[in-house]
Image (cartoon, grey):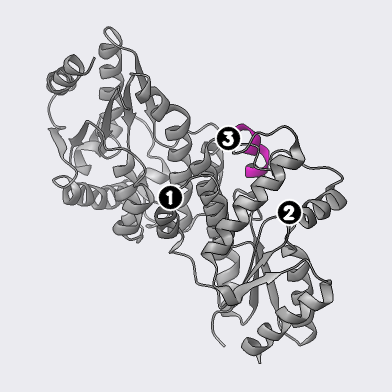
């Protein structure tokens, strides 16, 4: 039986969701055991994916499957045992990231949903919604380079990074919007200040944590 | 002739590889181009699976998905292009072998079949089965010993590796047989040439 709480964060690159997830973890840790896991971070698959992307070895299908393997490794090794032992598990990206990224590459949503059907539904999924233009502006301000995968370089090869970013992330936003209702996303306006957003998130999470101990 | 995949399904030691090799030689003699795929043979992830297997022996779903990724990489990057060029692909273990592996470990049949539905269906399937005694003898002859990891140590911890292996083979083959069409099942505990003749007869029907 699951005793813990599962909280997922979704949003495009540059939406601020990773900072929000990490702030939330620090806050929860004052009261409960908490664990934060990031997308694409399995100990033994992560570097294969990185290498394969660099060498452009992945097709839409193997892109989808190798990320599912990565997720499953973290799910079986960390997420599930921690939930069973009562942790609050925070996922910086969950299966919905695969729903959006795989389908914009042409894999059928129906199949991707089946592929991930073993994963339990989060208690809450926060979708930090920003337009790609805003996310790009933030990346520019932070003076950080756009990574090829953030610009969807595999589906828009040859585009300048910023242009690729806007095009690719717009497709992702479109897909998130499409599934938001069915998947019960709590939609957060990502244009607000980080502090305002964190307060909004804590208000929602507070209810789950207090009742679930 | 369009896409042609011939799948050899079975547990290690069932004669999968030996019969595949024999059919390969046979087809090549007849002038066909033949290409081979199989479990843990992809450039993408094959070697890594071998390295980490013992660390993730209880992560059955992950291992299953890793095997599926491994097959997908071979099919997308090597098999499809060669089939387009008129080659025949021989699979040394394909979707039924994977599903039987998962069934023996409690993974859901429906889920596995959904995941595997993206792969091309084989034109021809040979499900190779044999008695545990025979299979174990073959493995000892080949490797010199019984590897606990291949013996399904994760699902049946028994007094000794022979007994463990025996019950694992039974579990695996029961699953495989339940997944296979009756006419596709070939018993390999006979003379090699006799079994080969049986296989070649069916291959001939599809290639000529």
- Discs 2, 3 touching: Cβ within 8 Å: no
Q: Residue at x 71, y 78 (%)?
A: B199
- Write down the quadrant of residue A80 in the picture: top left
Of the two numbered discs 3 and 1 in the rendering, the one whose residue sits closer to the viewer = 1
Quadrant where the C terminus of chain A sits is top left
> In the structure shown, which secondary structural element does the residue marked by tag 2 occupy?
helix
Where is residue B27? Give x, y as percent.
74, 82
Q: Which is more foreground, mark 2 or mark 3?
A: 2
On screen, residue B99 above or below B85: above
Q: How would you rate the neighbour count of disc 3 (Cα within 10 Å): few for under 14, some for 14-19, many for 20 or more?
A: some
Q: What's the residue at 20%, 36% (across, down)?
A: A127
Lower position in the chain sequence, tag 3 or tag 1: 3
Q: Earlier in the sequence, mark 2 or mark 1?
A: 1
Residue drawn at x 78%, y 53% is B133
Chief secondary structure of the magenta span?
helix
Label 2: chain? B
Circle on res. B56: 3
> Quadrant of residue A37 in the image?
top left
**Secondary structure under the numbered disc 1 in the rendered image:** loop
With respect to residue A160, does A94 lie above or below? above
In the drawing, does residue A204 fall left or right of residue B137? left
Residue B30 lies left or right of residue B177; in this view the side is: right
Chain identifier of the residue bearing label 3 in the image:
B
- Span of residues in magenta: B49-56
The residue to which callout 2 is attached is B132
Subunit ID for the residue under disc 1: B
Q: Is residue B162 above or below residue B74?
A: above
Is residue A40 or residue A85 the one in the foreground? A85
User: Does residue B125 appear in the picture of this structure?
Assistant: no
| Circle 1 residue | B108
């Amino acid at each position: 039986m699951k005793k813990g709480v599962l909280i997922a964060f979704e949003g495009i690159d540059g939406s601020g969701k990773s900072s929000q997830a990490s702030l939330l973890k620090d806050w929860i840790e004052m009261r409960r055991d908490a664990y934060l896991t990031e997308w694409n971070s399995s100990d033994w698959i992560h570097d294969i994916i990185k290498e394969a992307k660099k060498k452009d070895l992945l097709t839409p299908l193997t892109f989808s499957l190798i990320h599912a393997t990565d997720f499953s490794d973290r799910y079986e090794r960390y997420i599930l045992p921690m939930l069973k032992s009562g942790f609050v598990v925070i996922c910086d990206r969950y299966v919905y990231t695969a729903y959006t990224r795989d389908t914009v590459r042409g894999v059928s949503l129906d199949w991707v949903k089946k592929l991930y059907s073993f994963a339990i539904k989060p208690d809450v999924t926060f979708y930090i919604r920003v337009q790609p233009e805003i996310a790009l502006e933030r990346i520019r301000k932070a003076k950080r380079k756009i990574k090829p995968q953030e610009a969807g370089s595999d589906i828009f090869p040859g585009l300048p990074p910023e242009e690729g970013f806007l095009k690719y992330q717009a497709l992702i936003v479109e897909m998130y919007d499409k599934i938001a209702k069915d998947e019960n996303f709590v939609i957060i306006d990502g244009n607000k200040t980080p502090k305002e957003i964190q307060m909004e998130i804590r208000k929602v999470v507070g209810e789950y944590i207090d009742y679930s101990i | 002739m369009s896409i042609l995949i011939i799948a050899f399904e079975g547990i290690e030691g069932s004669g999968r590889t030996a019969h595949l090799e024999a059919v390969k030689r046979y087809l090549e003699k007849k002038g066909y181009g033949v290409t081979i795929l199989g479990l843990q043979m992809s450039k993408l992830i094959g070697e890594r699976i071998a390295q980490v297997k013992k660390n993730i022996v209880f992560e059955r779903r992950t291992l299953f998905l890793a095997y599926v990724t491994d097959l997908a990489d071979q099919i997308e990057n090597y098999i499809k292009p060669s089939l387009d060029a008129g080659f025949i692909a021989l699979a040394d273990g394909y979707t039924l072998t994977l599903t039987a592996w998962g069934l023996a470990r409690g993974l859901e049949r429906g889920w596995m079949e959904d995941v595997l539905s993206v792969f091309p269906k084989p034109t021809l399937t040979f499900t190779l089965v044999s008695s545990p005694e025979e299979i174990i003898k073959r493995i000892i002859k080949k490797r010199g010993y019984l590897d606990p990891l291949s013996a399904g140590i994760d699902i049946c911890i028994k007094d000794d590796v022979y007994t463990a292996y025996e019950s694992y083979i039974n579990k695996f083959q029961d699953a495989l047989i339940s997944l296979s069409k009756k006419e596709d099942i070939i018993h390999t505990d006979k003379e090699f040439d006799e079994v080969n003749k049986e296989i070649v007869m069916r291959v001939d029907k599809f290639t000529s």
